[in-house]
Amino acid sequence: MEKVKEYDLIVVGAGPAGLTAGMYGVRSGLETLVLEKGICGGLSNEAPEIENYPGFKRIRGMELAEKMKEQALEYVEIKELEKVEKIAWSGKGKEKNMVVFTEKGSYVTRAAVICSGTKHRRLDVKGEDEFLGKGISYCATCDGFFFRDKSVIVVGGGDSAVREALFLNNIGCKVTLVHRRGKLRAEPYLQKNLEKAGVRILWNSVVKEIRGDNVVGSIVRFDKDRGIEDELSAEGVFISIGEEPVNELAVQMGIKTNDNGYIITDKSQRTNLERVYAAGDVTGGVRQIVVACAEGAIAATSAYNDLQENR
């Protein structure tokens, strides 16, 4: 029987937080492994353009993620396309470790950092499931090219929604932004760019249904100001109404979360479980790449300090 490989630290997730935690783990002298269910970068891969990450005036999210991965691989072992399904405790006292079960095998570790990130929030309206991949998308960077010179709807009012609207406008789409409030939540800089671009905004509007034959053809919009529904033609619908934490693993382990499902940590990124840490968007707060990197570094450093004390 093949012996299960043992690690000092396993990082779950290879977004900015996970990649940074992996680097800091190895640099601290810990035998470290990073496991990622998809590809490195997480949702940062979908950012059309990043203008607030130190060192880069402007960079595509996918490009920044690739640079992070390239640097991390100089230090740490990364296994992509290997989803963690369960983490269980084994042993007692100082011999107590965690067993990490994935789709492809199992690993033993003394400490773990959960960097599972977030996923796109759904509208949960009629037609969303039916037309997913047939005109509905949650990623303008991924799918925008297919809608050049076409009329599209962007749903949302935060930073991500405005960035997606600007990206789609820049590649030639005819963009309408639908927002349920009378004011955008995006940072002022992005709002100014949206105004300069002349993107049409439908205020106080809610998407009630997405219609079409084989592909998206229109949306049903409820106008809160007039109290009526109308139908708007669209060949694409980009949904950008925020994210929710990928917390299934945390819930299974008994890690405490807040009312919105985000993992609760202290300033050292420790959770309520001994030798289990969390970093990045799954902890909520200011969900920015630079913050995720900082939290990943703190989590790995805390793991090192705690493991040294328990030797």
Image: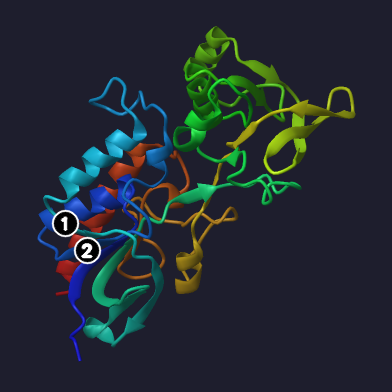
Decide which of 302, 124 is in the foreground and name it.
124
Q: Residues within 10 Å of mark 2 (few under 14, many from 20)?
A: many
Q: Does residue 223 show up? A: no
Outermost residue, right side: 227
Q: Does residue 222 show up? A: yes
Where does the N terminus fall, quadrant-wise?
bottom left
Look at mark 1 in the image and give the residue it sits on: 76
Please report whichever mark, 2 or 1, sits nearer to the chain's N-terminal start: 2
Look at mark 2 in the image and give the residue it sits on: 33
Would residue 30 be found to the left or right of residue 44 on screen? left
Q: Using the image, determine if residue 208 lies above or below residue 113.
A: above
Picture residue at 29% right of the left edge, 43% below the top: 293
Q: Using the image, determine if residue 15 lies above or below residue 163.
A: below
**Residue type marked 2:** Leu
Q: Quadrant of residue 265?
A: bottom left
Would residue 225 be found to the left or right of residue 84 on screen? right
Q: Quadrant of residue 208?
A: top right
Would residue 34 be found to the left or right of residue 30 on screen? right
Residue 244 picture location, percent across and down:
55, 50
